[in-house]
Amino acid sequence: MKLYEMAIAPNPRRVRMFMAEKGLLDQVERVELDLQKGENLTPEFITKNPMKKVPVLELDDGTCIPETMAICRFVEESHPETMNLMGETPKEKAEIEKWTRWIEFYFFLPTGMAFQHLSGYFKDRMEPNESWGLNCKNDVEKFFHKLNKHLADNEWIAANRFTVADINAFCTVEFARVVDVRIKDEQTHLQRWFDAMKSRPSADV
Amino acid sequence: MKLYEMAIAPNPRRVRMFMAEKGLLDQVERVELDLQKGENLTPEFITKNPMKKVPVLELDDGTCIPETMAICRFVEESHPETMNLMGETPKEKAEIEKWTRWIEFYFFLPTGMAFQHLSGYFKDRMEPNESWGLNCKNDVEKFFHKLNKHLADNEWIAANRFTVADINAFCTVEFARVVDVRIKDEQTHLQRWFDAMKSRPSADV
């Protein structure tokens, strides 16, 4: 299997951390692309992912799977013998999916949009809208607060155990530094959880 | 089970159509909320979904499941005896999840944002940004084009069969009328698929 990625980008990191937790990361050949140079815009890469995004997992039979959570789903379903990260029962699966969606819609996407609209990183291929970027950054700050409140009563984000929801939230907290949002001193529950996440070997892959 | 919804809103419709296709819709008691009147902002509803959105599926044991795809996941996983809509094998599950994410990120969310930012429907609780709304509407038009191209070579959106991806795309095509985006005369493949979808009994629930 090959993983097409840009190592510093947050979505590929979510996949690497997921595969590391499942003990499968060493089964993957990593292929680095430079997105700012447009290495994801070549005709060859577009056949792998018409949406021109990383990560893409290419299987040995040539099947290409784009989209972070679709890759995680494939890895989880094809390796039930490794640690379960997306739920065992219907209720657990639903709770974890609820949280991964909340993290995606109210945290990860606003962070990405704040970054793109405030930094101008992709200004060759989109028109930055500063007031929309500031609106998104405000949503990111609100979600830090929500997570801190949730983690006051919960050791982990979903299902009372470590899951893909923790991976997604952790990668977003680290990503949010690009828009200068960080854990505040008073967000002690979020900090406790973040320190626990940071100490996992998968945080370094 | 109870389904909290606003019948005309697109996300509750996705869930109803999903449950109808699985033959389970009549097992659910429907509870109508008026979002513009703020009936989703009451303390009682916030205990069911802190994000204040519909749909929410409330199980008989009191467990509340918000988020359209988390509800679909729960229904799919707890009723494997009914028609499979989210994939049988790891590869099929990944392909369907890839498409549901593309539809969500590049089609449904831009339609919702274009609506909110161009219509002012929720202007009591958000600040509309017209130029962002127009940007999103442009993305919606692009996705109509992408879908038409994809459906030139594919009877259904994912996995060569009817799946939740078709439900999500169909509900978004209909939703897009609120921002005045419709299937164009030349988008014949999209129209063929849309007509097939429209003729299913689940399109009317």
Image: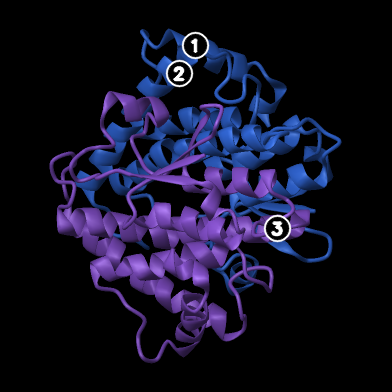
Chain colours: A blue, B purple
Residue depicted at 68% across the width and 68% down the height? B159
- Decide which of B6, B111 is in the foreground and name it: B6
x, y percent for residue A142: 32, 27
Q: Residues within 10 Å of mark 3 (few under 14, many from 20)?
A: some
- Decide which of B183, B27 is in the foreground and name it: B27
Residue depicted at 61% across the width and 39% down the height? A13
Res A45 visible: yes
Are the numbered discs 2 and 1 placed on the same chain, yes or no?
Answer: yes
Query: Callout 1: helix, strand or loop?
Result: loop
Q: Identify residue for label 2.
A: A150
Report, in whole angstroms, how far the alpha carbon at label 2 lies from the one at label 1.
6 Å
Work out which quarter of the rendered image holds the C terminus of chain A and state it. top right
Q: Is residue A195 left or right of residue A30?
A: left
Q: Label 2: chain? A: A
Residue depicted at 32% across the width and 49% down the height? B6
Under mark 2, the amino acid is: His
Q: Are marks 2 and 1 in contact (CB under 8 Å)?
A: yes
Res A181 visible: no
Q: Label 1: chain? A: A
Under mark 3, the amino acid is: Gly
User: Could you say which disc has been placed on residue A94 in the image?
Assistant: none
Q: Residues within 10 Å of mark 2 (few under 14, many from 20)?
A: some
Q: Identify residue for label 3.
A: B87
- Decide which of A90, A186 is in the foreground and name it: A90
Q: Identify residue for label 1.
A: A153
